[in-house]
Image (cartoon, rainbow, N blue to C red):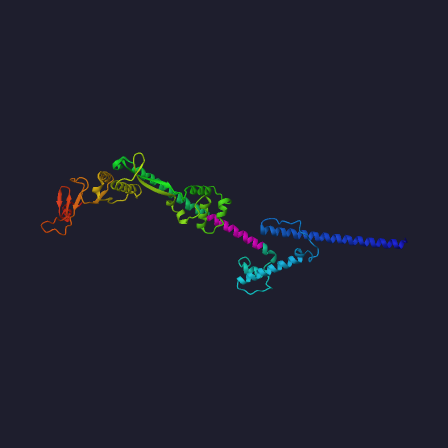
């Protein structure tokens, strides 16, 4: 081989080396740019979807965008374009606007989210981040509203539980009142008032719900689900159902303290056996219940007459005497109407007014109404009133 041939070979080899070196440098630059773009894409993806993107290592990639059939880059690009245009048409139709294929991303963003993008002149590169920021702000606002609603819900049921326990206390006080020695009804009977927990509205859920509120489990379990509700009535029902309540329930019933218990009022013997009792005994029991309510529940310190109306008092027998003694002790005025007088007629402490009706009576046989006030008899009640001192 001549020297010239060797020089030519050397020249060609050096040329190929330079081309290979340039090619390597170009590919390294391409890889560097691709890595930078991939990093930015991953960051944007994470901002939007709150997690890292997942890659499928089995997806085959082609250098030619038209290769690969349905998996080709060209097909994917065409599919994305079609879906984008379809979405734009749907958005504009809902806004009653004509379709414009040349509409910009900025204009579209302004139409859809005018509070986020106040004009169509927006930086399209920042659209995703702006939307992500607004969504984060909305999510935070919704959580704050949900927390406030849960606080309101807690205050409601704290008050419900307070009134509920107060009712049960009053029931126990009334039952204790009825068990006193001077409240015995004939035949060894006593009136009894007890409360029984409702099977449809278990009070246990009130305690569990309030306990969870007090421990502020605000981000998991029941409370995370409650935050998703907009209507506070639905929040109330969901909380009740989550803690074992009935599926068919109304908010008004949940907020009514009386829903959580039933009252049982009976006549009982000394051995706690329930007795149906006679008419006089059941009447006496009802009268005692009214006295108990007035004595324990009604507002104290109120001035005025306390009236105990008793119907057909002569039919109560010795039960009337018991009520009469109670009336004297607790300063009630007894008002009764009966065919015959009830109890004994005494010189004082009772006024009896006798009324007669006989349309067939003549002037000689007619007996006018008359009043018996102590040991005096008056036909005209005005006459009796006028004879009394001014301070009576």
Question: Number of labelled discs?
Answer: 0
Percent from the top left, x then y, of residue 240? Answer: 44, 45
The span shown in magenta is 129-149
On whether residue 145 falls in the magenta region, the answer is yes
Residue 45 appears in the picture as rendered: yes
Q: Is residue 21 left or right of residue 52?
A: right
Q: Residue at x 80, y 54 (%)?
A: 16
Q: Quadrant of residue 332?
A: top left
The residue at the point 50 percent across, 51 percent down is 142
Q: Position of residue 127 (x, y in %)?
A: 59, 56
Q: Nearer the viewer, residue 244 or 120?
A: 244
Q: Is residue 232 left or right of residue 339?
A: right
> Seen in the image, is 207 located left or right of residue 332?
right
Residue 176: x and y in percent read 31, 37
Q: Is residue 17 above or below residue 181?
A: below
Magenta highlight: main SS: helix
- Location of residue 278 (image quadrant): top left
252 left or right, relative to 98: left
Q: Residue furthest right?
A: 2
Residue 213 percent coordinates (x, y): 46, 43
């Amino acid at each position: 081989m001549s020297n010239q041939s060797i020089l030519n070979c050397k020249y060609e080899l050096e040329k190929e080396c330079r081309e290979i070196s340039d090619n390597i440098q170009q590919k390294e630059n391409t890889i560097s740019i691709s890595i930078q773009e991939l990093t930015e894409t991953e960051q944007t993806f994470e901002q939007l979807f709150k997690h890292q993107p997942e890659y499928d290592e089995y997806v085959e990639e082609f250098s030619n965008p038209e290769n690969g059939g349905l998996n080709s880059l060209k097909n994917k690009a065409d599919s994305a374009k079609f879906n984008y245009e379809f979405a734009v048409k749907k958005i504009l139709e809902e806004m009653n606007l004509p379709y414009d294929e040349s509409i910009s991303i900025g204009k579209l963003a302004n139409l859809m989210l005018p509070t986020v993008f106040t004009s169509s002149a927006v930086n399209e590169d920042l659209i995703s981040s702006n939307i992500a920021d607004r969504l984060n702000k909305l999510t935070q606002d919704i959580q704050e509203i949900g927390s406030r609603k849960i606080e309101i819900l807690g205050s409601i049921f704290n008050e419900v539980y307070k009134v509920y326990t107060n009712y049960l206390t009053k029931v126990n006080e009334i039952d204790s009142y009825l068990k006193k020695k001077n409240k015995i009804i004939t035949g060894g009977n006593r009136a009894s008032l007890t409360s029984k927990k409702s099977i449809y509205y278990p009070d246990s859920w009130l305690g569990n719900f309030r306990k969870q509120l007090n421990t502020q489990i605000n981000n998991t379990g029941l409370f995370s689900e409650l935050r998703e509700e907009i209507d506070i009535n639905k929040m109330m029902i969901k909380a009740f159902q989550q803690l074992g309540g009935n599926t068919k329930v109304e908010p008004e019933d949940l907020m009514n303290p009386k829903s959580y218990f039933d009252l049982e009022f009976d006549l009982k013997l000394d051995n706690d056996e329930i007795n149906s009792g006679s008419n006089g005994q059941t009447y006496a029991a009802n009268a005692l219940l009214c006295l108990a309510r007035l004595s324990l529940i009604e507002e104290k310190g109120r001035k005025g007459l306390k009236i105990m109306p008793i119907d057909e008092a002569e039919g109560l027998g010795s039960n009337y005497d018991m009520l009469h003694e109670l009336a004297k002790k607790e300063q009630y005025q007894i008002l009764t109407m009966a065919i015959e007088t009830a109890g004994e007629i005494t010189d004082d402490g009772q006024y009896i007014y006798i009324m007669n009706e006989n349309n067939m009576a003549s002037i000689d046989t007619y007996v006018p109404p008359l009043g018996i006030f102590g040991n005096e008899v008056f036909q005209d009640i005005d006459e009796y009133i006028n004879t009394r001192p001014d301070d009576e």
